[in-house]
Image: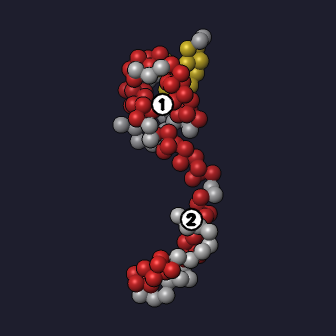
Amino acid sequence: MMVSGERDPALVERLKRLGGKDSSCCVPEYQGLAHEVLNTSSFHLSLRGYKALADENRLLALALLKRRKELCACEIQAATGLTHATVSHHMSLLAETGIVSARRRGKWMYYRLNEKPGVKIP
């Protein structure tokens, strides 16, 4: 993505062909808009959430939580075949993004899907 303020001549030419006029004036506007979006906290929060979903094991854990109200880390471990440390890491990432909530009961961690996770869970 070119957000440095430089004008890509090929892009200007494509925009001219599409719009039928000299479109070089709108390139900085679009670049400014992209820069504005990239600098919002909501963009980075959404990006973290979608990156969290990009892992097969995390998405599987979420699908399991969708089908059960709450699961212990050991239950997620048993279902996925992952080590305890790996489950803990994955669930921590999901909790940081606000997709799941975690609570400790004794030495065990329990996870549940938040009411409005902001993402579609299979």
Q: Residue furthest front?
A: 9
How many marks the image carries: the answer is 2
Which numbered mark, 2 or 1, is in the foreground of this view? 2
Relative to residue 108, is residue 8 depicted above or below? below
Rendered-image quadrant of the C terminus:
top left
Question: Residue 19, percent across and down?
Answer: 42, 83
Asked whether residue 80 appears in the rendered view, the answer is: yes
Disc 1 residue type? Answer: Leu
Asked whether residue 15 appears in the rendered view, the answer is: no
Disc 2 residue type? Answer: Ala
Question: Residue 18, percent across and down?
Answer: 40, 81
Circles 2 and 1: CB distance less than 8 Å? Answer: no
- Please state which of residues 1 and 122 is positioned toward the viewer in this rendering: 1
Comes first in the chain, label 2 or label 1:
2
Relative to residue 78, is residue 52 depicted above or below? below
Q: Residue furthest top?
A: 106
- At 44% from the left and 41% from the top, the residue drawn is 54
Applied colour scheme: secondary structure
Q: Please tell me whether mark 2 sits on a helix, a strand or a loop.
A: helix
- Mark 2 crowd level (few <14, some 14–19, many ≥20, 10 Å Cα): some
Residue 113, numbered circle: 1
Residue 79, numbered circle: none
Using residue 16 as the reference point, say whether residue 8 is left or right of it: right
Q: Which residue is mark 2?
A: 34
Q: Looking at the rendering, which quadrant does residue 77 occupy? A: top left
Relative to residue 61, is residue 17 depicted above or below? below
- At 54% from the left and 28% from the top, the residue drawn is 89
